Image (spheres, rainbow, N blue to C red):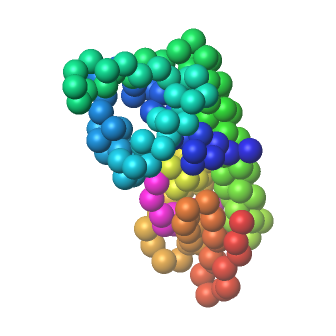
């Protein structure tokens, strides 16, 4: 099961506070790409659960400290993140290998790859590892990557989606 957005945010907050106990809610919000109010909600929840302690350093300045329970949570969330990342990698590889098999069954030894990002990079490396040549011409089948979808188009044919 992939980490929820809440768990991902908790992990980022815990890591950021561990690196910089003087981090502000504004700096955490910038790091997460969310509103300060969202960070405030997460912090209050983490404090209520005993994962973070807060101390007032100055009149308007707070210092956040991760408790031993918070360190354990960060470790568990990190391990969950790694596990989920490997699971996602395996899914992408499996989909890429399925597409490559269809390309080979159709007698092609080269493909054109369209798309950007990590999923496209995994597809590119899988193609190369499997001995397919990556080309730019229009006569080769096209592997299109969009988010987690890998689509295969043969010249003058409808697309297959994986």
Residue 47 in the image, given as x and y percentages of width and height? 52, 28
In the displayed structure, would residue 23 be above or below residue 105?
Answer: above
The residue shown at (22%, 21%) is 58
Magenta residues, as a range? 107-117
Q: Is residue 108 magenta?
A: yes
Q: Closer to the camera, 129 or 151?
A: 151
Residue farthest toward the front in the current orientation of the protein: 59
Give the quarter of the image for residue 90: top right
Q: Is residue 76 magenta?
A: no
Q: Is residue 113 shown left or right of residue 73?
A: left
Quadrant location of the C terminus in the rendered image: bottom right
Residue 105 appears at what percent x and percent y? 77, 65
Tell me if residue 47 comes above or below residue 162 in the rendering: above
Q: Is residue 138 left or right of residue 143?
A: left
Q: Residue at x 63, y 46 (%)?
A: 4
Residue 15 image offset from top left, x and y in percent:
45, 26
């Amino acid at each position: 099961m992939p980490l929820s957005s809440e768990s991902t945010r908790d992990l980022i907050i815990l890591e950021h506070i561990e690196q910089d106990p003087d981090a502000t809610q504004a700096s955490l919000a910038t790091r997460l790409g969310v509103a300060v109010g969202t960070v405030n909600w997460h912090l209050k929840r983490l404090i209520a659960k005993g994962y973070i302690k807060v101390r007032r350093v100055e009149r308007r300045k707070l210092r956040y400290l991760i408790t031993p329970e918070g360190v354990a949570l960060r470790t568990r969330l990190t391990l969950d993140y790694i596990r989920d990342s490997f699971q996602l990698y395996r899914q992408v590889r499996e989909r890429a290998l399925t597409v490559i098999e269809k390309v080979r069954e159709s007698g092609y030894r080269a493909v054109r790859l369209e798309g950007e990002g990590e999923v496209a990079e995994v597809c590119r490396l899988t193609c190369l590892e499997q001995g397919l040549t990556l080309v730019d011409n229009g006569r080769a089948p096209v592997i299109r990557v969009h988010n987690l979808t890998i689509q295969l188009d043969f010249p003058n044919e409808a697309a297959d989606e994986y």
